[in-house]
Image: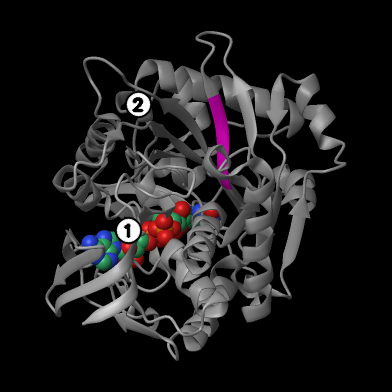
Amino acid sequence: MNYDVIIIGAGPGGIFSAYELMKKKPGLSIAVFETGHPLEKRKCPIDGVKVKSCIGCPTCAIMNGFGGAGAFSDGKYNITNDFGGTLYEYIGREQAIELMEYVDEINCEYGGSGTKMYSTSGTSFKKKCMQNGLTLLDASVRHLGTDINYVVLENIYAALKESVDFYFDTPVDTVETDGDGYRVKCKAGEFTGKYCVISVGRSGSKWMQGICEALSIPTKSNRVDIGVRVELPSVIFDDITSELYESKIVYRTEKFEDHVRTFCMNPHGIVVNENTNGIVTVNGHSFEDESKKTENTNFALLVAKHFSEPFKDSNGYGESIARLSNMLGGGVIVQRFGDLVRGRRSTASRIEESTVHPTLAATPGDLSLVLPKRIMDGIIEMIYALDKIAPGTANDDTLLYGVEVKFYNMEVKLDEHLETTHRGLFVIGDGSGVTHSLSHASASGVYVARYIAGN
Ligand SMILES: Cc1cc2nc3c(=O)[nH]c(=O)nc-3n(C[C@H](O)[C@H](O)[C@H](O)COP(=O)(O)OP(=O)(O)OC[C@H]3O[C@@H](n4cnc5c(N)ncnc54)[C@H](O)[C@@H]3O)c2cc1C
């Protein structure tokens, strides 16, 4: 089968490539290959009753399938160059923002219009942060929420499937050069395309590495972010979350001058397990639906670790720490802040007596046995710094879940068109190492589609 464009991966990057190609050049033949299921068939078997932990499905319903890793996410589309990726380094700051705004327009058109856009511009909160040694990063954020995010994906798929051939449950095995174009091999057969856009996300990182080796595309290692998820009564952060929803705050520690940052804030949300290649880590969700809101807010506190010589495997380092927590706790560990600073483990009865009711059933334990001292010290320092702008953050009953790890793909060598050293072969989204967010991944898809359509 011959196509004009072959897209590998149906996450936000792949979806927005296909969407923009369909709009800009309606006559193009486009195929999307996806390891996972169509959206409606994506169901994680963990129900908390019969199935309590990961049973290692052949494809993970949370990470793979139409919508990619973002399908069941909180659907926070941040419009900013300050975090979420370094797309601006390739395409310029102005264009990166324009494309993220365009993605927002599409999301609104396909069901997200009733959701709220928050912004840091003009907030007095920025000054308050500065006065307390904290930096508030600039951003606008559209919060779709897990429920509306799903609706938007359903609607976009309905529009795409009329013009685009989707091959679900079809992981691409290999990509080879074929004359002027590319040949992909998978269980459905062999397919050629003049252009090939690879958008395989985090879950496709090992595969991506293999493809880069096979096609001699240079790569370099990236960073890993390690930390905990904090859960506290929503009232403590209400002033911040009602104005900004998602605030990215950075703190430089006094002891080591490391940067600790808040990440993925979920007002009135829940803490959830996340499974990455069989390792259970922690994450958070929140909902637009009033009936699903909880009395708690959660967010991550993360410290970035970069490695150079001789050790380069940042992700391996993060995985080992997460494995250690899984070994000690059988999964995610939860600890009261008061127990952590007193140097004792949390127990089921201490968690039971806590005024903060955990939204995730995790194992009470001691995070100081898992996280390296330098990272743990940084997190404790930041909690005390946050306590100055949101009094109550450093309460004894504040819950810390660990570990939260944010893995990054290695960076693929790309030019200003996000094109590899092979003409017509593009790598976009999180799989490229350039992006690590919904908005940046989607914008990279639009960008490449426009370039292909203009050729
Ligand atoms: C629980 C969770 C919550 C998140 N919340 C947010 C948030 O609120 N805001 C935010 O900005 N970001 C969030 N993120 C991150 C965000 O989801 C990702 O940055 C984004 O999905 C990246 O898009 P992508 O298209 O590059 O990759 P992905 O979304 O990972 O999609 C890649 C797709 O490629 C497929 N694939 C992989 N290998 C192959 C292959 N060989 N052949 C065919 N298909 C393949 C995969 O199955 C997958 O569906 C969250 C992530 C998670 C896991």
Tell me how many marks there are: 2
Magenta segment:
260-264
**Mark 2 CB near ligand 1 (8 Å cut):** no
Query: Mark 2 or 1 closer to N-term?
Result: 1
Which quadrant of the frame does ligand 1 lie within? bottom left
Tell me the quarter of the image containing the N terminus: bottom left
**Mark 1 CB near ligand 1 (8 Å cut):** yes
101 sits to left or right of 315: right
Q: Position of residue 349 (x, y in %)?
A: 41, 43
The verdict on residue 263 being magenta is yes
* Predominant SS of the magenta segment: strand
Q: How are the colours assigned in the image?
A: one colour
Q: Is residue 359 visible?
A: no
Neighbour tally class for label 1: few under 14, some 14-19, many 20 plus, Cα within 10 Å: many
Which residue is labeled 2 in the image?
A: 371
Give the label on residue 1, or none. Answer: none
Between residue 128 and residue 441, name the one nearer to us: 441
Helix, strand or loop status at disc 1 = loop
Q: Is residue 255 above or below residue 167?
A: above
Identify which residue is drawn at 31% across, 31% down. 221
Q: Kindly identify the amino acid type of the residue bearing the numbered disc 2.
A: Leu
Identify which residue is drawn at 19% across, 41% down. 216
Q: Position of residue 100 (x, y in %)?
A: 63, 57
Which residue is labeled 1 in the image?
A: 200
Q: Quadrant of residue 41?
A: bottom left
